[in-house]
Amino acid sequence: MIYSNTLEIWEHHWGRFMYKVIMPEISDGDDDITLVGWLVSESDIVKEGDDMAELVTDKASFDLPSPKSGKVVTLVKKPGDKVMAGDIMAEMILGE
């Protein structure tokens, strides 16, 4: 079962709610975003605001901050992948 709104997606999985880390919109028309690498690993504990990933466009590089505090369960995208606003980047269990 999946619960969603424009900012958050939750999925009930093994009795826990998995929080989906979504790629935010960076700027209008910026479709060429590449995931350079992850700054976290699966099973890492992160705090809200911690940098999770490094991304680059043809204009700039930037980090993707964690939107919530919790445990990283799955890194969905791989380094070198092209990403777009709305893509699921990672999954977390909150409050771990």
Image (cartoon, rainbow, N blue to C red):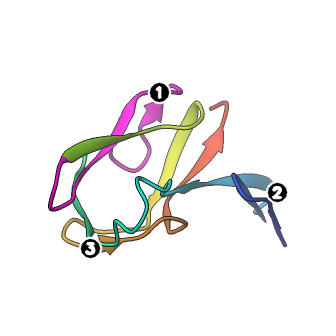
Which badge, 3 or 2, comes first in the chain's sequence?
2
Circle 1 crowding by C-alpha within 10 Å: few under 14, some 14–19, many from 20: few
Are the residues at dot 1 and dot 3 in contact (C-beta closer than 8 Å)? no
Which badge, 2 or 1, comes first in the chain's sequence?
2
Are the residues at dot 3 and dot 2 in contact (C-beta closer than 8 Å)? no
Of tags 3 and 2, the one toward the viewer is 3
Circle 3 crowding by C-alpha within 10 Å: few under 14, some 14–19, many from 20: few
Task: Please tell me the numbered disc located at residue 15.
Answer: 2
How many numbered marks does the figure carry? Answer: 3
Circle 2 crowding by C-alpha within 10 Å: few under 14, some 14–19, many from 20: few
Residue 85 pos. (x, y %): 48, 65
Q: Which residue is mark 3?
A: 81
Read off the magenta span.
Answer: 40-60
Q: Which residue is mark 1?
A: 49
Residue 28 pos. (x, y %): 43, 61
Q: Nearer the viewer, residue 8 or 74?
A: 8
Left or right of 40 on screen, residue 86: right
As measured in the structure, the alpha-carbon distance from the residue carrying label 2 to the one carrying label 1 is 26 Å
